[in-house]
Amino acid sequence: MVMQLSPRERILVALDTSDLDTAVKLVSQLRDQVGGFKVGLELCTALGAPQVVAAIAEAGGSLFLDLKLHDIPNTIAGAARAVCALGPQVRMLTLHCAGGSAMLRAAVTAAQAMPHRPLLLGVTVLTSLDAEALTSELQIASPVTDYVVHLARMAQQCGLDGVVASPQEVSAIRAACPDLRIITPGIRPHWAAVGDQRRVLTPVDALRAGADYLVIGRPITNPSPEVGDPVTAVTRIVAEIELAGVEL
């Protein structure tokens, strides 16, 4: 079931930086323009998750903590409790589906016992991987879409709230798991460079496919001079979604 959110609420800005001042400045600029901010390993490794969460929250940002947790079940349960203890400012937390069902269930059980439980999201296949890499490097014979849908079904069965997947797999996930939240990185407006992402779509196409949230980094945080500043970039993306008449 696609969530009823405005175009702005569906945008999660990726703060892919190791500099906290840069991240806080972006939050201050965009906190009233978007639905939240994704903070990942780069910033959390540089400074530690508690300090990062506190600073982003103080600046008025709602957090998607993209740590992609992947370890034995007992360790992941402890990590999930630690994230929950950071408070309600952490709205989302990612775990790698590749860790298996026992690991995912351990995270769900641990989070459910805490006063605050963020949305738990299973990372399926990284958007930097394509079919050739999946086959030749990871020795996974299934087509990318089939494998992603398999992981999404497993995540749902384990009690996760949603999955993170390339926009190219969104429609297949939506058909297989109608009530699962779908968060999509690899979003590139037609006027932005693709960069190191391989399986990408525009914001309009991803929403039409059934995505709930769009993770957008460099097209917003480091737009081209022709686009302007981050606020202008968000405004342009929102206008394109509204002009396309996407049902939200």
Image (cartoon, rainbow, N blue to C red):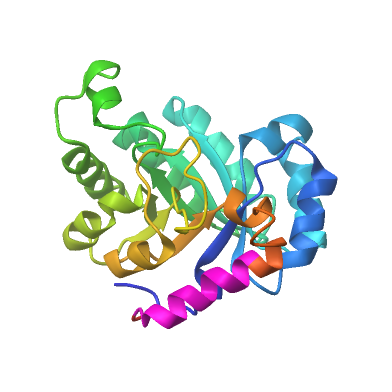
Of the pair 192 and 172, the residue shown nearer to us:
192
Tally the marks.
Answer: 0
Q: Residue furthest right?
A: 21
At x 61% / y 41%, what residue is drawn?
Answer: 40
Q: Is residue 3 above or below residue 230?
A: below
Horizontally, residue 90 falls left or right of residue 178, namely: right
Q: Is residue 96 above or below residue 8?
A: above
Coordinates of residue 80 in the picture (x, y in percent)? 55, 42
Residue 248 can be seen in this image: no
At x 27% / y 48%, what residue is drawn?
Answer: 152
Coordinates of residue 61 in the picture (x, y in percent)? 71, 63
Coordinates of residue 187 in the picture (x, y in percent)? 45, 53
Horizontally, residue 79 falls left or right of residue 230, namely: left
At x 76% / y 49%, what residue is drawn?
Answer: 23
Of the pair 234 and 150, the residue shown nearer to us:
234
Image quadrant holding the C terminus, namely: bottom left
Q: Is residue 96 magenta?
A: no
Residue 247 can be seen in this image: yes
Image quadrant holding the N terminus, namely: bottom left
Q: Is residue 236 magenta?
A: yes
Dominant secondary structure of the residues highlighted in magenta in the image: helix
Per the rendered image, the range of residues in magenta is: 233-246
Rendered image quadrant of residue 148: top left
Horizontally, residue 82 falls left or right of residue 245, namely: right
Coordinates of residue 100 in the picture (x, y in percent)? 31, 32
Of the pair 105 and 232, the residue shown nearer to us:
232
Horizontally, residue 15 falls left or right of residue 139, namely: right
Of the pair 25 and 147, the residue shown nearer to us:
25
Q: Is residue 32 above or below residue 21?
A: below
Q: Is residue 208 above or below residue 166?
A: below
